[in-house]
Amino acid sequence: MTTDFFRRRNLAGGTERMPHWGMNSEYGVLQDVLIGPMDHYTWQTGNAMSRRSMRLGRQFDKEVAKQQYQEMCDIYEHCGVKTHFLQPDETLPYQIYARDSSVMTPWGPIVTQMYSPWRRGEWLEVVKFYQENDIPLYDVVTAGTFEGGDFMVMEPGVIFCGYTGERTSKEGLNQVRGWMEKEGWEFRAYEFDPYFLHLDVKFAMLSEKLAAVCTQAVEQEQLDWLKSRGIEIIDLSYRSVLELGVNVVALGNDRVLVPAGSTELVEKAKAHGLEVFSPDMSMFTSGGGGVHCMCQPLSRKDA
């Protein structure tokens, strides 16, 4: 096992787990979360969701955004989740979406490679955070592009990873796939249209064997694969996708964080017996990212 901070990954596989950091599912009890700062957040025109908001005449209100951001953070604290924050950089308007600049695996974090020019500098504060908290990196993506919104530690032993050729390229995906498969994990790749930005726009694990999916936007082959794994699907409408309604965070113990605007999922999740926390996040979902985009789980209890 190397002692290099930038690569604790065992090149032959069999990398050791860390005592606290890491996760083996998207739905184990969330213990620590990394959240991006909103100090310099503004809507950008680099994604279809924000362009739609602007076309519809919506306007960004920073004071409202601050209130919504604080409510989200308060919910994490209320649920016993320790919150950690990246240091703000005035040149990075989308630094708030901490999901994308790194991903957490069972063996530690991977620093990714961002697609959009205004996001490429996000790696610096991410690396500083992991160094300052003595969390060595599993590895760093060096091939193509790779963003965390496409990467799901779906359940123990299985990675579900999307790619469009833009935010996550085939080259970046194949590099990470090689690492995961050497650890003995199944790696399911799913190619889809760049309009949908990331996989977490139309797919989310809510709890063990329960997922929210916009089936209208996912090919039947992928739906069949999910069903073959015994995963029950809560189907959400295409309109929910347009409002980032599938972009949610499982808190563990059948609790889930769902934006208030996703009324369809709020109702269906409650009908499935889940405890739902639903802050208004409209200032962020209208900019192209929801609560899932805004958090990077650092530690979950094993499922």
Image (cartoon, rainbow, N blue to C red):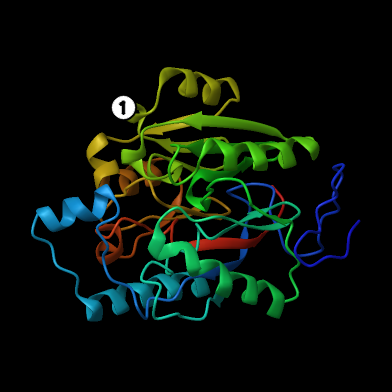
What residue is at 38 percent from the left and 39 percent from the top?
A: 202
Q: Where is residue 29 in the image (x, y as percent from the top left)?
A: 62, 57
Numbered label tally: 1
Q: Say which residue label 1 marks.
A: 216
Q: Can residue 21 be seen in this view?
A: yes
Q: In this view, does 217 lie above or below 149?
A: above
Q: Position of residue 84 (x, y in %)?
A: 57, 76
Q: Is residue 75 above or below residue 261?
A: below
Q: What residue type is labelled 1?
A: Gln
What residue is at 72 percent from the left and 37 percent from the top?
A: 178
Within-10-Å neighbours for mark 1: few <14, some 14–19, many 20+: few
Position of the N terminus, as image quadrant, is bottom right
Q: Can residue 208 be seen in this view?
A: no
Horizontal side, residue 16 vs residue 253: left or right? right
Horizontal side, residue 261 vs residue 58: left or right? right
Q: Residue furthest right?
A: 1
Compare residues 250 and 140 and report the one nearer the observer: 140
Horizontal side, residue 44 vs residue 172: left or right? left
